[in-house]
């Protein structure tokens, strides 16, 4: 799919828009996808929409069934376990590789991203900013690891885990819960310092703890939605 690395293409625009709707559950799990509706809503032609949907099928966000149609891929509690057992190891590997292969330009970008963190005591109040920082730190680390196979897979896994978080929040009455908490951003500060100092083992260890905490938060919300 050539549009993946061409953010100026119409196919990428369609991909980005539909992906965001799926991740944030504006297009919920199991939703039937209608190409004509998407064309009208996004004001894009059939070809960009189809290319985007094919890419999203590869990323397991869309399920295409012959003679039945296209659907937003469903979510199950088993997905949580399987997703994070893979992500736990690959994210740690990326952190370790980034520590040895990352360049100063990577660390400057990460420092800039982390500098945006809300310094108030109630930093969870800025949900969009926390999410922006978390995603930026992961993407910079994937790039610093300098392994395209690893990078491509981790980008897909990150998106799936983010959708899992949004799904978990639908199970709780606490509508003010942040998608990414301030503690997750604090984790990135320590991971950044370990990678920059080329301490790969430390970076991998901290990343494992970060991913486990993320998984545990989601699992806790799903299994105990009222906080009991």
Image (cartoon, rainbow, N blue to C red):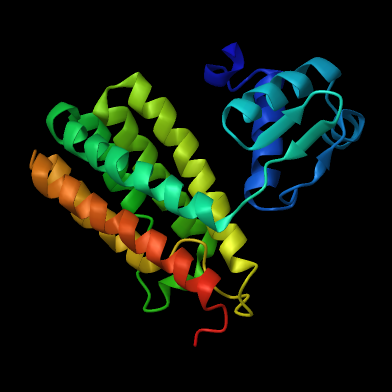
Relative image position of residue 15 (x, y in whole percent): 67, 29
Give the quadrant of residue 166: bottom right
Judge from the rendering whether residue 176 lies leftward or rightward of residue 205; answer left or right.
right
Placement of the N terminus among the 4 image quadrants? top right
Above or below, comparing residue 216 to residue 158 in the picture: below
Relative height, residue 103 to residue 212 (above, below): above
Name the residue located 29 percent from the left edge and 57 percent from the top edge.
210
In this rendering, the count of numbered labels is 0
- Residue, far top: 2
* Residue 44 in sight: yes
Residue with the most extreme bottom position? 228
Q: Residue at x 40, y 43 (%)?
A: 136
Q: Give residue 27's position: percent from left, percent from top.
A: 75, 48
Residue 101 in the image: x percent, y percent?
A: 17, 26
Q: Residue at x 84, y 34 (%)?
A: 38
Image quarter for residue 41?
A: top right
Q: Is residue 34 above or below residue 113?
A: above
Foreground: 171 or 12?
Answer: 171
Tell me: 43 left or right of 189: right
Horizontal arrangement in the rendering, residue 217 relative to residue 2 (left or right): left
Does any portion of residue 118 appear in the rendered image? no
Q: Is residue 40 above or below residue 45?
A: below
In the rendering, at what x and y percent does residue 187 appear?
A: 27, 59
Residue plotted at (16% across, 51% down): 205
Q: Is residue 151 left or right of residue 97?
A: right
């Amino acid at each position: 799919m050539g549009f993946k690395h061409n953010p100026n293409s119409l196919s990428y625009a369609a991909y980005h828009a539909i992906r965001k709707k799926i991740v944030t559950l504006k297009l919920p799990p199991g939703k039937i996808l209608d190409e004509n509706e998407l064309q009208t809503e996004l004001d894009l032609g059939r070809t960009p929409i189809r290319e985007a949907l094919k890419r999203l099928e590869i990323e397991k966000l869309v399920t295409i069934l012959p003679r039945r149609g296209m659907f937003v891929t469903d979510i199950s509690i088993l997905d949580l376990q399987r997703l994070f057992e893979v992500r736990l190891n690959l994210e740690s590997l990326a952190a370790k590789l980034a520590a040895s292969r990352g360049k100063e330009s990577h660390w400057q970008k990460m420092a800039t991203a982390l500098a945006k963190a809300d310094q108030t005591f109630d930093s969870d109040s800025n949900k969009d900013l926390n999410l922006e920082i978390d995603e930026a730190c992961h993407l910079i680390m994937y790039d610093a690891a300098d392994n395209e196979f690893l990078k491509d897979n981790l980008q897909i896994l990150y998106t799936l885990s983010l959708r899992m978080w949004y799904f978990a929040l639908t199970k709780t009455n606490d509508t003010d819960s942040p998608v990414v908490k301030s503690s997750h951003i604090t984790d990135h500060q320590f991971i950044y310092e370990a990678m920059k100092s080329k301490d790969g083992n430390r970076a991998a260890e901290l990343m494992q703890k970060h991913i486990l905490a993320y998984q545990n938060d989601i699992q806790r919300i799903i299994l105990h939605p009222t906080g009991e």
